Amino acid sequence: MSDRPRVLVADSDSHVAQSFADCLGHGFDSYAVESGADALAALDGEGMDAVVVGRALADMTGGELLASLRARGAEGPPVLTTDAALVEEPPVWFFVSRRMAPDDVQTVVGAALGRRPEAPAAAAGISSRSEAAGLQQVLELSRKFALQKDLPGARAVAVGAIAELIDADRAQCLFYDAGSGSVWTEGASDDVDTVATRGLVGFSARTGVPVMTSSAREDGRYDRKLDDPRGDGDERILVQPVSGPDGQVHALFVAVREGRRPAFTDNERARIQMLAGQSGPLLSQLALQLEATELLQEDVTEQALFRREAVEAMASAGKQGDVIRVSPAWVTWSYWLLVALVVAAGVYMVVGRINQYSAGPAVVRVSGRTELAAKQPGTLVDVYVSPGQSVAADELLARFDDTEQRAAFERAQRELEAQLRNRMLDPGDAATAQAVQTLRERADAAETQLRELQVRAPRAGTIGDVRVREGQHVVAGDPLLSMVSGEAELSVIAFLPGGDRPRLSSGMTLRLELRNYRYAYQTLTVDSVDAEVIGPYEAKRFLGPQLADAVPINGPVVLVRARLPKPTFEADGVEYRYFDGMQAIAEVKVDSKSVLATIVPGLERFVD
């Protein structure tokens, strides 16, 4: 006798039975019957591991066969159906559509028999900055998830996390009970309360297998009512099961993107899978916490002063006890004090203001600053200047190893001088004239190569930083030193959140607090606000290699500029100088509301 699972297909349509057997393949033994009586007999006599009920049989309908199976009690093999009309009928475990792929049919039948597909292999590790940023974002969202104390809060955090991670048009977090097969939402406007017997959501809940489809209606498992009630069939759906330490599915993350937008990528699926892996244990802990809290509340009720039965009996009799009146002298003046406090709080809520600020990192920059970088690789043999030294235009600042170039230049000079003497002895010799011209060009080229190995001041100014030393080898593009020309003007460049761009304009007040100098605030006026919002990479490019890694920029920003009125600032009674690259925190007030309008937004137009 074969040890493969035995699946009974009960349907009077032989094509349905044959199609189902073809989907199951060689991993299962399929048996077909055309009547309900034969199906019940096969279950009693031969024993079956699973039953598939079709629309109609020779002696009864599929619904009547389900009623007979239901009358037998909970014991029995799992029941699947190929009839969409029976999908809500117990004890149906899952609806198998004729449009489902054979692999999906085998997966769902295997899951009904207790077979769990192998979990996807864990990622090999972090191999790029984008993966590290994605992991950091997932961990931050998971920490928010861990702070929730109830299922509605967990659902709200999960929905926001899904939308933030993969830019979904719609997102949902569905909770799942593996014992009853129930799927439901908590605290959502579009509540779901059904059984996971159909759709992409039901398939993922029952099997624990994630689903990603580029077109919903082309997937045979799709069910609009459960998967995406607001969809039109063209949308792209990603379903990720969330499993706990016990391996059971406790929730499902559903992300939907409209058909006109790009399909979900493997990287986005990996992020949602990573979020599910982090959220599974937390969700399991939340379920245990809620269960324990409910039990403790029952214990508190049992230990109350009056028994529950006595309270219920008193209420049913319609009797009310007399009020105990205890009024010490201090109750009166405490009452009026409380009234005064309430009135004062009400006045403050109307008169008091709460300001909203746009805040972000800022950097002090010095205008007129020039960075000198290496034009070609080489070894520095001489550095002639030091920080703070004044230099003239075209003054030699540093020199690369030019032994070969200098020898070539001197050799060309000697040959040129020799030919010039020959030319003076015989002015009419055309060959000598041509040789002089050739040697003069060679000498000029050698001199040009020699000057390329010299670092000279492009203009008069003062040396700032010297970042190299004698004997150091550099490559093309490496910074060598900086210089400031003329009267340096100090300014501040702030990187404020890009979402605040519509509320920012020139002329606003900017408050600056330098890092490591707490409460040393500087009040400035915004000179300009860039018209475009840029990403973190472009912002770091704007800062340059010297400051790109030092300034924390994590999202879209807009550049805001302001001038510093003087080159010094005061902190704790001591005056200090500003230096290029100093970091600070910038804040610009973008809105102000009364306390009452902040607490009750609907009253904003009446009190502000």
Image: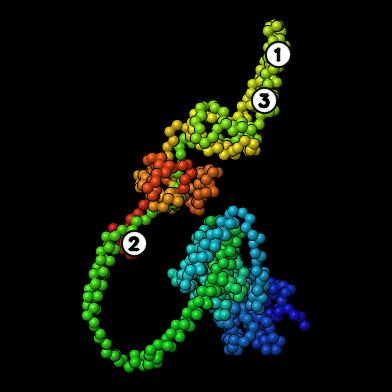
Residues packed near mark 3 inside 10 Å, few (<14), some (14 to 19) or many (20 plus): some
Query: Within 10 Å of the Cα at label 2, are there few (<14), some (14-19), or many (20+) other Cα atoms?
Result: some
Query: Where is mark 3, residue-wise?
Result: 406
Q: Nearer the viewer, residue 451 or 234?
A: 451
Secondary structure under badge 2? Answer: helix
Identify the amino acid type marked 3.
Arg
The dot on residue 418 is 1
Query: 548 or 567: which is nearer to us?
Result: 567
Of callouts 1 and 2, the N-terminal one: 1
Place of residue 108 in the rendered image (x, y in percent of width and height, measured from the top left): 64, 73
Mark 3 / mark 1, whichever is N-terminal: 3
Q: Is residue 451 left or right of residue 348?
A: right
Mark 1 residue type: Ala
Q: Which residue is drawn at the image coordinates 65% and 64% (left, top)?
A: 122
Residue at image point 23% right, 69% down: 340
Q: Position of residue 256 (x, y in %)?
A: 53, 63
Q: Considering only order in the chain, which callout, 3 or 2, is on the residue closer to the N terminus? A: 3
Q: Report the mark closest to the observer, 2 or 3.
A: 3
Q: Residues within 10 Å of mark 1 (few under 14, many from 20)?
A: few
Q: Position of residue 44 (x, y in %)?
A: 67, 89
Task: Name the mark nearer the viewer: 1 or 2.
Answer: 1
Q: Is residue 52 above or below residue 480?
A: below
Estimate the spatial distance between the alpha carbons at disc 1 and disc 2, rounded to whole Å: 91 Å
